[in-house]
Image (cartoon, rainbow, N blue to C red):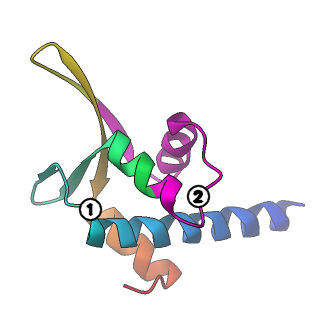
Amino acid sequence: EEKQKAASDSSGLMTLLSVLSRMIEDLPPTERTADRLIFEADAVFDYFQKSEEFAWLEHRNTLTKRLRQHGFTKDRRREAGKRRDLYVIPTELLSSLIERYGIPA
């Protein structure tokens, strides 16, 4: 049972990384720093929902949980009285996971 769970977690992570890798090529980040890419959470959710692998997603918090499980974070900012939810993708973490799991670039 433990091995099954680990295997499904691993394949789930590989699927997540695969879509994330494609998204970074297709979707310009809202902000880019030396070590992080920051994306509007709604744009990321839309991208994942339109992908074949995550077409089943109904709620953004499901995606947030999956991203958080692997070290990615969500940030909330207020600008001009409006709330903005953002996903923060540390580039070094993403690169090491993509390399470890052999996700094609």
Look at mark 1 in the image and give the residue it sits on: 27
Residue drawn at the location 19% of the way across and 60% of the way down: 28
- Residue 62: quadrant of the picture: top right
Q: Of residues 63 and 90, which is closer to you in this image?
A: 63
The three-letter amino acid code for the residue at tag 2 is Phe
Q: Viewed as shown, does residue 66 lie left or right of 76?
A: right
The earlier-in-sequence mark between 1 and 2 is 1
The boundaries of the magenta stretch are 48-75
> Farthest front residue?
50
Look at mark 2 in the image and give the residue it sits on: 54
10 Å crowding of disc 1: few (<14), some (14-19), many (20+): few
Q: Of residues 40 and 14, which is closer to you in this image?
A: 40
Q: Of residues 54 and 16, which is closer to you in this image?
A: 54
Tags 1 and 2 touching, CB below 8 Å: no
Q: Quadrant of the C terminus?
A: bottom left
Q: Callout 1: helix, strand or loop?
A: loop
Q: Quadrant of the N terminus?
A: bottom right
Measured in 3D between alpha carbons, the distance from the residue under mark 1 to the one under mark 2, in whole angstroms, is 16 Å
Q: Is residue 102 above or below residue 43?
A: below
Q: Position of residue 79 (x, y in %)?
A: 12, 22
**Count of numbered circles in the view:** 2
